[in-house]
Amino acid sequence: MKTARIAASVAIAGAVALGASACNLVTYQATTEVYDPSDGVSGSVGTVDVQNALLVTGDGETATFVGTVTNLGDDPARLGLQYETASGERVTEEFWVPAGETFTTSFGDREQLLFTDLDGSIGGYLDVFVQYGTEQGEVLTVPVVDGSLPEYEALLPADFDGDVLSVTDPSYDPRTEESEEEGH
C-alpha cells in the first residue's frame, strides 16, 4: 500500500511537471515571427535581400531611398528599383550589389539614391518594384517619411534646403500643400 501511494505521488508529480513544462508546445511563439521592427519594409528577390527600405523627403517631390541591401549569392547582381512618378512615367534606378556583401544605400560615403517627381505623399507609401536579372521581382510598399525627426534629417536629399513639410505640422495639408497660415 505504501508503495502504491509513493507510485501515485510520483505519477501525479510527473504529470504536473510535464503539464507545466509542455505548455510551450501549443503556445504561439512571437519570437519565430519575421517582422520589420522599424519604419521601413523588407523583401527578397532571388539571393538579394532589401531590408528596412524607406523614402525620406523634405518637400514630397524628391526623396532619398534608404535601405540595407544584402547579396547572399556568389555573383554580383544589378538591382533595379522601379517606381512611378507623379506624371505617370516609370523610372528605374539601378546599382550593383557585390556578391556576399551588405551595405546601406544613401548612407555614409555612398551616393544618395534619389527618387524624383514624386506626388508629395509624405506619410504615405510608394510602390517600388525590386528586381534583378531573370529573377521574379517583388513590389515593396515603401513608406515615405519626412525629415522632421533627427534620425531622418541627415538622410534628406542633399540639395534640399527648404523647410521640411511635415505630417506632424497641423497646418500641413497634403491635398493642397499650402498652409493654413497663408490663409488657404
Image: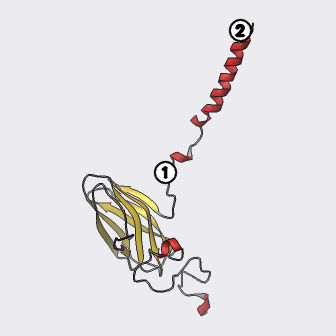
- Where does the magenta region start and end? 108-112
| Residue 11, above or below 177 | above
| Residue 45, above or below 86 | above
Q: Amino acid at mark 2?
A: Thr
Measured from the top left, where is residue 122 in percent x and y?
A: 51, 75
Q: Nearer the viewer, residue 74 or 128?
A: 74
Q: State which quadrant residue 170 falls in.
A: bottom right
Of helix, strand and loop, which mostly describes the magenta segment? loop
Quadrant of the image containing the N terminus: top right
Relative to 184, 130 lies left or right: left
Residue at x 71% of width, y 8% of height: 3
Q: Secondary structure at mark 1?
A: loop
Q: Nearer the viewer, residue 151 or 180?
A: 151
According to the picture, the residue beneath numbered tag 1 turns out to be 34
Relative to 94, 152 lies left or right: right
Q: Are marks 2 and 1 in contact (CB under 8 Å)?
A: no
Q: Which class describes the residues within 10 Å of circle 2: few (<14), some (14-19), or many (20+)? A: few
Q: Amino acid at mark 1?
A: Val
Asked whether residue 123 appears in the rendered view, the answer is no
Q: How is the image coloured?
A: secondary structure
According to the picture, the residue beneath numbered tag 2 turns out to be 3
Q: Nearer the viewer, residue 30 or 139?
A: 30
Measured from the top left, where is residue 106 in percent x and y?
A: 38, 71
Asked whether 14 falls inside the magenta stretch, the response is: no
Residue at x 74% of width, y 12% of height: 5
Relative to 24, 143 lies left or right: left
